[in-house]
Every structure is written in C-alpha cells, then in structure tokens.
Image: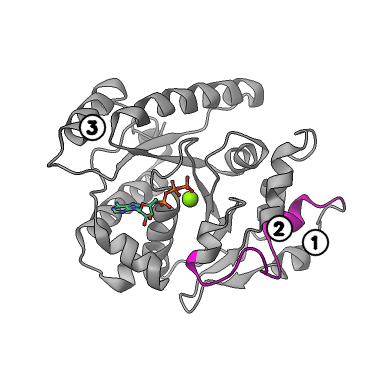
Amino acid sequence: MRIWSVANQKGGVGKTTTTVALAGLLAERGARVLLVDLDPHGSLTSYFGYNPETVEHSTFALFAEHMISAREQVQALLIPARDTGIQMLAASPALATVERRSLSGTGVRISKALALLWDDFDYALIDTPPVLGALMVNALAACEKLLIPVQTEFLALKGLERMLRTLEMLARSQQKALPYLIIPTLFDRRTHASVSSLRTLRNDYPERIWAGMIPVDTRFRDASRVGLLPSRLDAQSRGVEAYRSLLKILLSVDNAPAAMKSSTALR
Ligand SMILES: Nc1ncnc2c1ncn2[C@@H]1O[C@H](COP(=O)(O)OP(=O)(O)OP(=O)(O)O)[C@@H](O)[C@H]1O
Ligand SMILES: [Mg+2]
C-alpha cells in the first residue's frame, strides 16, 4: 500500500477536493483505494453522504485508550464511499479532542492502523484539518508522500512558508525527510493575484512544485453538492483533466527506478 497525505495549515485551499479527485481517478484505474478522514469537521465524510455527528465508526476509534491492534478491528471501521468502490475511515467531531492531547504515544496511531490494512488496499489517501496538531502529525508520520495544495493568492504563500518550516522541524525530530509536492490550486488566469502568485511559487520552490496547476472549476462544487466523484460528474472537465495529469506525475515517480527518484520534484 502506498500512503499519500494531503495537508496545509491553511483552510480552504483544496485539500479535500484534491483527496477526492485523486482517489476517484485511482479507483477508475482499478486501484483499491482507502480514504482516511482526519479532519474533525469531516468534509470528506460528508462528501459521501455521511453525517460526521452520527457516523457509526470513525478514525477517532484509532485514538481511543485501548489501542486497536488487530486487522479485523480496523476493517470493522471501514465504510463504503457511496458506490465508488472506495472504502473510507470516516471522521467525527470527537477527533478534535485528539488535537488537545499531548502527542506522546499518539503520533503514530494512523501509521499503525494502516499497517494492519497493508494487504487490503493499493492506495490510502489521508485528508487533514487545517491545523498543525496531533492529527496532522499522524498523517505526516504515516505517509510516504505529502501533497501540499496551495491556493494561488498572496496570503497563501505566507501559510506555505509556515507549513514548510513545520515540516523541517518534524523531519529533524523524526530524522527522515518527507518528500513533498506543492500543488497550485484554484488558479484563475484572469486575475492578477493568481498569475503573479503562481509565478512567485514557481520561482521560490522550483524543485518542489508541480509544473501544472489546478484551475478554478465550478464542477468541483457541483460534484461535492451531489456527492459524486469529480471524474464521474464530468470526466473531461478542465479541473479533472488537471488532476489526471497530476496523478500521472505522482505515479511515474512511484514507478520510477530508485536512481531516478532522487532527481524528481518529490525528493
Ligand atoms: N479547483 C477548484 N475550483 C473551484 N472550486 C474549488 C476548487 N477546489 C476546491 N474548490 C471548492 O473550494 C472549497 C474549499 O475546497 P476544499 O474543501 O477542498 O478545501 P480544504 O483545503 O479541504 O478546506 P478545509 O481547510 O476547510 O478543510 C470547496 O467548496 C470546494 O468545492
Ligand atoms: Mg478539507
């Protein structure tokens, strides 16, 4: 199983949309996909028609006092993401209490749970809350690759700096650097703010940024309103096409020989 996390301390930058869009495209290719909702608001959970307030099983169980240690226990928490074939570990508001706890012992709960599902899925995609806390730390510790959606507007650039400083800190404390890719999102080529912040991003992070960008596309809102995978609502929309080319890059890095990996953006 390959585990990718989608994170940015800043809210509303397209984390959940990126998670859903990529999961849908992976599932279309025949991959067995698991979605993990680590956001106490449960946007991903709601996307597929569940109410986070009342959902029967949630990732909160993984942080309970009695640690889950058997594969069947984690499997019992899975719920289907509608009829997409994708399975999900849902979120509930109780997850917010995890943020307030001290990190000791709880930083690798998600890694451990996903290790138990290793043979059940090809990909796990983790959606995170816009908060640097225990939940994000869990997501970062569990994944082999981090995707950082960044909205192409000026305020977002500051948020990105903070996010990257945090990553450096974590890398030092865990003594492993996490490969990451910056994904420009909500790009609107008619606005000066979008065009010039994309230019700044490319200039400041030439090795870390995906060469493409995700355009503003109203089909994403339409898809979330009806709870459909974006690629199922409109397989040819500009936004879906953009995620398709992003996925191509992500997969080519996964499948490249080790020697090549060191020369890609996902170092
Ligand atoms: N490329 C896009 N074009 C148009 N709308 C988009 C795009 N990406 C996301 N959106 C919309 O913007 C809003 C915020 O997106 P999303 O929920 O994915 O962000 P988020 O980073 O997960 O937010 P939060 O930090 O609150 O979890 C949603 O209404 C979503 O439908
Ligand atoms: Mg979200």
Q: Is residue 223 above or below residue 161?
A: below
6 to 70, vertically: above or below:
above
Picture quarter containing residue 237? Answer: bottom left
Residue 13 visible to an observer of this rendering: yes
User: Residue drawn at (17%, 33%), measured in percent from left and top?
Assistant: 195
Q: Amino acid at mark 1?
A: Ala
Which residue corresponds to the image point at 66% horizontal and 58% vertical from the top-left? Answer: 92
Mark 3 → mark 2, Cα distance in angstroms = 40 Å
Quarter occupied by residue 238:
bottom left
What span is colored magenta in the figure? 47-65
Give the number of the disc on residue 198: 3
What x and y, as percent, mark residue 207?
31, 27
Q: Nearer the viewer, residue 162 or 68?
A: 162
Q: Residues within 10 Å of mark 3 (few under 14, many from 20)?
A: many
Q: Is residue 50 magenta?
A: yes
Residue labelled with disc 2: 116
Residue 91: x %, y % from top left: 63, 58
Badge 1 marks a residue whose secondary structure is loop
Residue type highlighted by circle 3:
Leu
Amino acid type, residue under disc 2 in the picture: Leu
Residue 245 among those drawn in magenta? no
In the rendered image, is residue 108 in sight?
A: no
Q: Residue at x 58, y 65 (%)?
A: 88
Pinpoint residue 223: horizontal percent, then vertical percent.
35, 67
Assess disc 1: are there few (<14), some (14-19) or many (≥20) residues with their C-alpha within 10 Å of its C-alpha: few
Residue sticking out furthest to the right: 66
Tag shown at residue 70: 1
Determine if the C-beta at disc 1 is less than 8 A from ligand 2.
no
SS category of the residue bearing label 2: helix
